[in-house]
Amino acid sequence: MPTRQWLAYGLFGLPLAMAALPVYVHVPRLYADAGINLALLGGLLLATRLLDAGIDPLLGWWADRTPRRSRLVVVALPFLAAGMLLLFNPASVGSSSPLLWLTVALIATYFGFSLASVAYQAWGAEIGRDSGERTLLTASREGFGLFGVILASLLPLLLAADTAAGLARLSWLFVPLLVLAAVVTVLGAAGDRQRLARVDPSRPATPPASLATLRHAFRDRRFVRLVGIFLLNGIAAALPATLVLFFVADVLAAEAMSGIFLALYFVAGVAGLPLWVFLARRIGRIRAWLVSMAVACIAFVFALSLGAGDVAAFAAVCLLTGLALGADLALPPALLADIAESPMASAGAGGYFGWWNLIAKLNLALAAGLALPLLALLGYEPGGDARGGTGGDAGLQALALVYCLLPVFFKAAAATLAWRWRNELEVCS
């Protein structure tokens, strides 16, 4: 595969990731500061993410019915652009209806992001002709995505002294970058279903039209087992993503360092990608994934001992968990791409990735819906502990336990299943 092709394909992952980071990391804190009750906010995030996740299989079916997946990427652009502008400019309508504003903005953002992601991922699975090319395309997409989250971590700090103002300005920069990346990817990454149908006449140009085909992916036992591991491991990754800003501000008392910590995390993820690709070639993708889970668990257990001022120690935690992130991003989707394009596949690539994105969003929804109400129940209040307000030591301890130990529990469960099913799933490698 020419270098220009896999680079052009991967570029669109950059703006997609730039959208994902602020939505999943900054929105809880931003709208909590706007006055929305923490339990109500957690419930709203859970409800909108569940709604968003529920349409992903339908989007996958739509993608399989569309001869040129790139068209769906283009259709998604205005929804994603408008949603980001609404989401991070809530002052445009004043402070009287932040809950309604947040709901509308989330729905627009989620729809555009979901449609673009499902079509984009399924397109990449079809461009690759074998496991090596699909791994390369996945690594390119996730590598550009990590650069995108690094930009999303740093730009709000560079664009304004206040985080909310920085996010607003980031949303205006995001729109032209999104359009530019889409143009490069659509024009430079050839390989849609029509081209493949001409190369391989036995490959159908469109799958059956019935919506009943949505469930066919679950006839594939390899897919079901991979999804089970992905679900547990994804919740483990989403929990700290939801809570990291609270932990940095109230446990470490280092809110000004939050952007730097996020940047360290994602820089480590980028740096670790070649390591995980190399390790996967030597010991297999499932075993390499297991190593990354162990690294993350060790780091989170260590983080439980941290307190106010432990900036250097938490930076080390960010580097280790960021290193593990590279494996989470590159290896599971590459395994799924092989399953989707194997002769034993029971559905189209869009169908597989539609369900995959549903599970990924369930991870985020469950993390927010579990962690935020749990913290409220345990007496934690944002900004209260480290700043002399209500909550006290009990609130700090609750935050630290939920942030550090819940991810370890879910990762241990995921690792157990991955080890149990390693031989069957390694066939995909």
Image (spheres, rainbow, N blue to C red):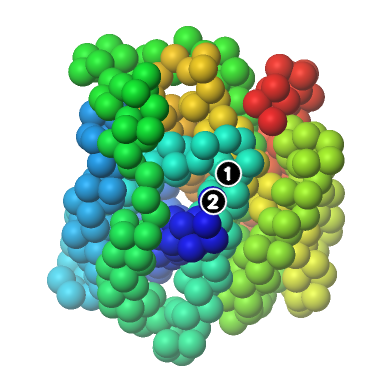
The location of residue 378, given as percent across then percent down, is 59, 46
Q: Are marks 2 and 1 in contact (CB under 8 Å)?
A: yes
Question: How dense is the environment of label 2, judged by Cα within 10 Å: few (below 14), some, or many (20 and up)?
Answer: few
Q: Is residue 29 visible?
A: no
**Image point (78%, 59%), residue name:** 320
Q: How many marks?
A: 2
User: Height in image: 51 above or below 272?
Assistant: above
Q: Position of residue 67 (x, y in %)?
A: 24, 35
Q: Is residue 118 above or below residue 214?
A: below
Indicate which disc residue 133 carries: 1
Q: Amino acid at mark 2?
A: Met
Q: Which quadrant does the C terminus fall into?
A: top right
Q: Nearer the viewer, mark 2 or mark 1?
A: 2
Q: Please state the horizontal and vertical placement of residue 400, each as a whole percent of the image.
A: 70, 54
What is the residue that sits farthest to the left in this orientation?
Answer: 93
Left/right placement of residue 252 relative to residue 133 reads right
The answer to whether one can see residue 279 in this image is yes
Residue depicted at x 72% and y 49%: 277
**Mark number, residue 408:** none
The Cα atoms of the two marked residues, 2 and 1, are separated by 7 Å
Q: Residues within 10 Å of mark 1 (few under 14, many from 20)?
A: some
Above or below, 362 against 307 in this view is: above
The amino acid on which the numbered mark 1 sits, given as a three-letter code, is Glu
Residue found 60% across the figure and 25% down from its top: 226
- Disc 2 on helix, strand or loop? loop
Q: In this orientation, which residue lies closer to the viewer: 182 or 379?
A: 182
- Residue depicted at x 31% and y 60%: 187
Disc 1, SS: helix
Q: Earlier in the sequence, mark 2 or mark 1?
A: 2
Query: Could you say where residue 418 lies in the image, as x and y percent from the top left?
Result: 73, 26
In front: 163, or 117? 117
- The residue singled out by tag 2 in the image is 1
